[in-house]
């Protein structure tokens, strides 16, 4: 009998389980697809299809759902960003596609407001582009953004977040400025998926908008890009099927998606747009409130459930008394030392935070017990 029949593949490999109270983190495997999504993947596993046709039909389904002209499933949100950058630099031109990542003679500059710089903006350079910050750490004006557009500007990148203030040029104004100069806008809206009206506004907000499908409950290595037909067609030309068609040998060959993954994205999106989100958020609140109650009366710590405007709805904050000699990082380290390991987040030096949307059944009780042992 094969070694890996019979379950618990992690234990057989000697890999320790982690209770994930962080959220949909890459370093923890991203997501746990629902029964609906897993069933769709198993169904897709039953036969082969022409991948180009599957990508076309799945793109039509997504575009209809989010209200855009076109869409395309990608190997994660970062792949969507990299392919979008390529599309803005070379379009669907087969000779230019073959040239990448050499951008000699091409428009190869991607502008980004400096205050919007973040770790993932490096992905915009993967196709050979140069990332050009505009403004300073305190903000960027519309005039500065417009003046930065030059002969080599291929696109403006925009990091979508719900809480930008007036020091950042809005996405709507950014698109207006860009289009006045025949420049495209790529928006990274990776996890900006709730409320649904907010997600739809994001999806419809730029020439190309990138999402990570792991946040919707699809596998870790899936995402999608949506936008205008012209630009999504260019993304397709630069994608992994584009490597095999039209002599393009596209750089997107490295961003291959399985037929099971494509179907999973469709199933996850369909489930996301039809589920009762009030019930979903209430279930998260109940689990965190259960943890809060379990920590009541514990000396040296205060527990409080706080609401937020993210798709997971609420987070439990556990503030540790400095008199314990423990910092938040000390608590995180001790949580990680146990078996199973527990991963959480922190705010400042004294507060450990826990998300519930990635917890399995009854794991909240294990967290409470371990916190009591560590802090008491």
Image (cartoon, rainbow, N blue to C red):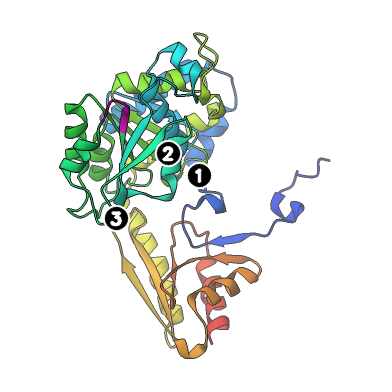
Q: CA distance from mark 1 to mark 3?
A: 38 Å
Residue at figure coordinates x 43%, y 78% from the top left? 350
Packing grade of label 3 (10 A; few <14, some 14-19, many >=20) is: few
Q: Which residues are drawn in magenta?
A: 150-155
Residue in the picture at 41% in, 68% down:
288
Answer with the quarter of the image where residue 190 lies.
Answer: top left
Q: Quadrant of residue 48?
A: top right
Question: Does label 1 or label 3 sit earlier along the sequence?
Answer: 1
Looking at the image, residue 229 lies above or below residue 224: above
Name the residue carrying label 2: 268
Numbered tag placed on residue 137 in the rendering: 3
Q: Name the residue furthest top.
A: 246
Q: In the rendered structure, are the residues bearing label 2 and label 1 in contact, judged by CB atoms less than 8 Å apart? A: yes
Residue appearing at x 28%, y 57% in the figure: 309
**Measured Cα–Cα span from mark 2 to mark 3:** 37 Å
**Which callout, 2 or 3, points to the residue nearer the camera?**
3
Instruction: Report the side of 90 relative to 239 (left or right).
Output: left
Asked whether 98 or 53 is in front, the reply is 98
Residue 130: x, y in percent?
41, 35
- In the rendered image, residue 215, in percent from the top left (x then y), is placed at 42, 46
| Residue 206 placement (x, y as % from top left) | 26, 33
Does the magenta portion include 151? yes
Quadrant assignment for the N terminus: top right
Q: Which residue is mark 1?
A: 33
> Mark 1 packing: few (<14 Cα in 10 Å), some, or many (20+)?
many
**Which of pointers 1 and 3 indicates the residue nearer the eye?**
3
The residue lying at 50 percent from left, 33 percent from top is 75
Indicate the secondary structure of the residue bearing disc 2. Answer: helix
Quarter of the image with the C terminus is: bottom right
């Amino acid at each position: 009998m094969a070694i890996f029949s019979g379950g618990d593949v992690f234990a057989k490999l000697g890999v320790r389980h982690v209770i994930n109270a962080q959220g949909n983190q890459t370093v923890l495997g991203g997501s746990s697809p629902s029964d609906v999504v897993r069933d769709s993947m198993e169904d897709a596993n039953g036969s082969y299809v022409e991948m180009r046709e599957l990508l076309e039909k799945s793109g039509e389904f997504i575009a209809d759902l989010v209200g855009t002209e076109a869409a395309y499933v990608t190997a994660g949100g970062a792949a969507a960003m990299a392919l979008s950058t390529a599309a803005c630099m070379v379009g669907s031109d087969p000779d230019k596609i073959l040239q990448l990542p050499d951008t000699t003679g091409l428009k190869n500059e991607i502008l980004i407001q400096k205050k919007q710089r973040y770790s993932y903006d490096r992905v915009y350079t993967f196709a050979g582009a140069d990332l050009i910050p505009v403004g300073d750490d305190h903000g960027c004006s519309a005039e500065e953004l417009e003046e930065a557009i030059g002969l080599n500007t291929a696109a403006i990148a925009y990091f979508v977040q719900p809480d930008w203030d007036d020091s950042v040029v809005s996405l709507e104004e950014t698109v207006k400025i860009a289009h006045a100069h025949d420049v495209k806008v790529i928006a990274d809206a990776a996890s900006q998926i709730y409320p649904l009206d907010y997600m739809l506004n994001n999806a419809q907000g730029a020439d190309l908008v990138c999402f990570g499908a792991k946040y919707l409950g699809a596998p870790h290595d899936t995402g999608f890009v949506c936008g205008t037909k012209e630009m999504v067609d260019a993304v397709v030309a630069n994608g992994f099927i584009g490597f095999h068609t039209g002599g393009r040998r596209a750089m997107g060959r490295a961003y291959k998606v399985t037929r099971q993954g494509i179907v999973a994205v469709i199933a996850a999106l369909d489930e996301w747009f039809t589920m009762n989100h009030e019930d979903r958020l209430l279930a998260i609140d109940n689990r965190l409130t259960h943890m809060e109650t379990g920590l009541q009366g514990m000396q040296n710590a205060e527990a409080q459930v706080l609401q937020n405007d993210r798709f997971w709805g609420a987070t439990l904050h556990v503030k540790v008394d400095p008199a314990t000699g423990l910092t938040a990082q000390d608590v995180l380290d001790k949580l990680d030392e146990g078996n199973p390991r527990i991963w959480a987040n922190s705010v400042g030096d004294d507060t450990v935070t826990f998300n519930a949307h990635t917890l399995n059944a009854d794991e909240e009780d294990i967290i409470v017990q371990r916190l009591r042992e560590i802090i008491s």
